[in-house]
Every structure is written in structure tokens, then in C-alpha cells.
Amino acid sequence: MATRIALIHAKQNENKMNIKCQKCLEKGHWTYECTGKRKYLHRPSRVEVLDKKLKEKEKKKKEIKDSIGEKIRMMEMKNDKDQMGNPPLPQQQTHLLILAVAHRVAAPTAEIDSSSSSSSDDSSR
């Protein structure tokens, strides 16, 4: 029985050496046992954290947009070469069509806005 208690105390002391005080940030004691002063620990504000995440998202979007633009340019160059020599294969035409649609989705057209405003003028008369 006495050895069991001794083992428990030994484990507690061993665990205590690995514990970090939340007040003074030193190891070896619990926060409620701390006699030291609280240390200042700089933490980023919530706005700084959110701004950082927002900038990362914008950077990823720009990288994706740039990579799509680069792929479109490469396909156009390849298409120009094919038009001078051999006609493009159906598989290449499909890729060009997909990239062209993606390019149109990325850049909205002004034609849609002008046609919708003229139709609304007709309905009000």
C-alpha cells in the first residue's frame, strides 16, 4: 500500500515537471501554485488573422485565374500552329471550347446588360 502511494506521488512529480504554467509560462508548477507575475504574450488581433486569411484566398484565386489564362494562351498558340498546317483534332477542339467558355464566364459581357435594360423599357409602356 505504501509503495502504491509512493508510485502515485512519483508520477505526479514527474508530470509536474512537464506542466507549463499559464501565468508565468514556466515549467514545473501549476497555475494555482504560481507566485510569479503574469508575462505579456503578444497575440495577433482577430482582424489581423482574418485579413491574413482573406489575402491568402485572394492570392489563390489570382493564381488559378492566371493559370487558366496561361492555358488559354498556350492553346491559342497551338491552335494558330495547327491552322497553318494540319487541321486540329476533335479532342483539341473540345479543349479549346471548354477554355473559351471558362474565359467567357470569367469576363462578363456588356451586351447582356444593354439587352435587359431595353426590354424593361418596353414593358413599362
Image (tube, helix red, strand yellow):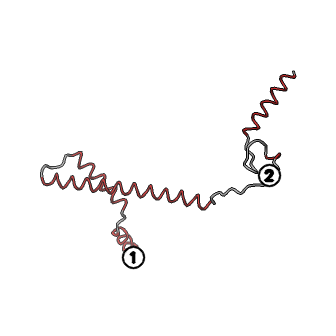
Residue drawn where x is 71% and y is 57% of the image: 40
Q: Secondary structure at mark 1?
A: helix
> In the image, is 117 to the left or to the right of 33?
left
User: What crowding class fits label 1: few (fewer than 14 Cα within 10 Å), some (14-19), or many (20 or more)?
Assistant: few
The x, y position of residue 4, in whole percent, is: 83, 23
The x, y position of residue 69, in whole percent, is: 33, 57
Residue 97, placed above or below residue 124: above
Q: Secondary structure at mark 2?
A: loop
Residue sticking out furthest to the left: 85
Q: Nearer the viewer, mark 1 or mark 2?
A: 2
Q: Quadrant of residue 49?
A: bottom right
Residue 18, placed above or below residue 34: above
Q: Which residue is mark 1?
A: 121
Residue 18, placed above or below residue 73: above
Q: Which residue is mark 2?
A: 36
> In the image, is 96 to the left or to the right of 8?
left
Residue drawn where x is 62% and y is 58% of the image: 44
Residue drawn where x is 15% and y is 49% of the image: 87
Q: Amino acid at mark 2?
A: Gly
The foreground one among 119 and 113 is 113
Q: Quadrant of the N terminus?
A: top right
